[in-house]
Structure formats: C-alpha cells, structure tokens
Amino acid sequence: MPQDHNNKRNSKDTKDDMIHLIDNLNRDDDLKYNRRAFLKSAVGASITLGLATLPFSAIALNREEDDTNRKMITRLKDLPKDSSMNFNYPTDDEPAILVHTKEGKLKAYNNKCTHLQCPVFYEKEESVLLCPCHRGFFSVDNGQPLAGPPQRELPLIELEVKDGAVYAVGRKVRHGE
Ligand code: FES
C-alpha cells in the first residue's frame, strides 16, 4: 500500500514535472522571440533614426560647402616673400592673415588668437605668428601654438594660386590635429 502511494505520488510528480518542463520550454521560446523582436525593433529604430537625420547631415555638408567659398585675396606679385597681408574670410567679419614666407610658401589662417581673440601678426625676425596681447606664438607652417597661453591652433585657410592670383578656397577648423 505505501508503495502504491509512492507510485501515485511519483506519477503525479512526473506529470507536474512535464508541465513545468513544457512551461519552461515555452518561457525559453518566449524569451527567444522577445529577444528577436527586440533586436528587430532596435535595428529598425537605428535605420529610422539614420534616415531621419539624413537631411541634417546634408545641411551640415552644405554648411561646409558654404564655408569653402572661393575668394580672391591678392595678386601674387603684390605680396613679396617674407611679408604678410590681412583679409577677411570666409565672411567679412572673420579676419585672416596671408603670409608669403621667406621660402616662398603661402600660408593663411584666421588671425584671431585662440587664447582671447587678439589679432595675430607675422613676426619676420623669427618667422612666426605672434599675438602681442600675452605673447602667444603660432607656427607659420601649420598654425599650431608654439608658446604662450594659446592651446589651440588657428583655423587654416586653404589656398589656391591660379593665373598669378591667390584665392582662399576653404577653411579647416581643426581641433587638436
Ligand atoms: S590673446 Fe593671444 S595670447 Fe592672449
């Protein structure tokens, strides 16, 4: 009799176990499907976001193009070696400096010092760009700060020489390059 009882109990337990097992399997399936659904919606959301931001990327690109207005600065013969001149670029409110170095290279930068915005000048003696406000020095070759308080480089103005004229054709605002 006690054995019978045990058998029944065992058989009941076995059924319960089966039900739990099936439950667990169903839960596993649910989890799998939920994960799949989540991944699908995450991918969908990423694509949607990407597409939604496309117009903004296009605007940003256009801004960059707007920044690359071509503007004649001077005739090369009017700017002898080891001299400089000021101009404005890309807008009339943004002062810039063009240097014709001793070696005959042309270099141009926006000339607001990156410390506190004083104008920067070409210093012939040392072939550097000097900000007299707090004696900040920048390299003529790449606009990087060399000494003094400035920590960031001057924005580089890209140049092109065509038919004896020097043009500003773009600007690169570099940060820590
Ligand atoms: S403003 Fe140029 S060094 Fe301070």
Image (cartoon, rainbow, N blue to C red):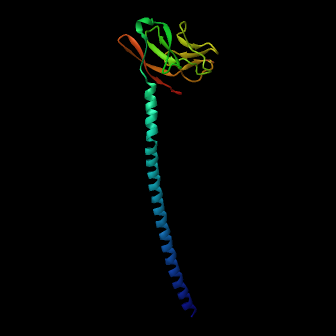
Which quarter of the image is occupied by the N terminus?
Answer: bottom right
Between 55 and 10, the one lying in front of the other is 55
Outermost front residue: 92
> Compared with residue 33, is residue 96 higher up or lower down, i.e. above or below?
above
Between 109 and 21, the one lying in front of the other is 109
Residue plotted at (41% across, 9% down): 75
Outermost right residue: 134
Residue 134, x across and y down, in percent = 64, 15
> Compared with residue 85, is residue 13 higher up or lower down, i.e. above or below?
below
Residue 69, x across and y down, in percent = 43, 23
> Compared with residue 122, is residue 37 higher up or lower down, i.e. above or below?
below
Residue 14, x across and y down, in percent = 51, 81
Between 35 and 159, the one lying in front of the other is 159
Residue 3, x across and y down, in percent = 55, 90
Residue plotted at (41% across, 16% down): 167
> Compared with residue 169, is residue 19 higher up or lower down, i.e. above or below?
below
Query: Ligand 1 shows up in which quadrant of the image?
Result: top right
- Count of numbered badges drawn on the protein: 0
Outermost bottom residue: 1
Residue plotted at (43% across, 41% down): 54
Residue plotted at (62% across, 12% down): 132
